[in-house]
Amino acid sequence: MFIIHLAVWERSSIGAVTVWIFFSII
């Protein structure tokens, strides 16, 4: 999970952020 978070922060992509939010809700 941490790797995904880091990837989202580094890329800062809308799609990545959407996936992160989805995982956060779950």
Image: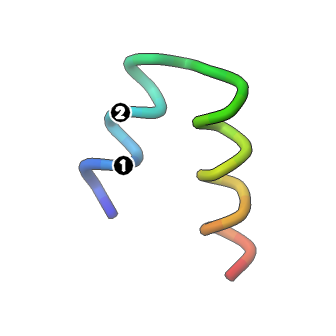
Could you tell me which secondary element the residue under label 2 belongs to?
helix
Q: Amino acid at mark 1?
A: Ile
Q: Quadrant of residue 21?
A: bottom right
- Disc marking residue 4: 1
Q: Position of residue 8 (x, y in %)?
A: 47, 33
Q: Is residue 18 left or right of residue 1?
A: right
Quadrant for the N terminus, please: bottom left
Q: Amino acid at mark 2?
A: Ala
Above or below, 2 against 25 in this view is above
Q: Position of residue 19 (x, y in %)?
A: 64, 51
Q: Position of residue 20 (x, y in %)?
A: 60, 52
Task: Read off the residue under disc 2.
Answer: 7
Above or below, 8 against 24 in this view is above
Above or below, 15 against 25 in this view is above
Could you tell me which secondary element the residue under label 1 belongs to?
helix
Alpha carbon separation for disc pair 2 and 1: 5 Å
Check disc 2: other Cα within 10 Å, few if <14, some if 14-19, many if 20+: some
Q: Is residue 18 left or right of residue 24?
A: right
- Disc marking residue 25: none
Q: Is residue 2 left or right of residue 18?
A: left
Proximity of marks 2 and 1: CB atoms separated by less than 8 Å:
yes
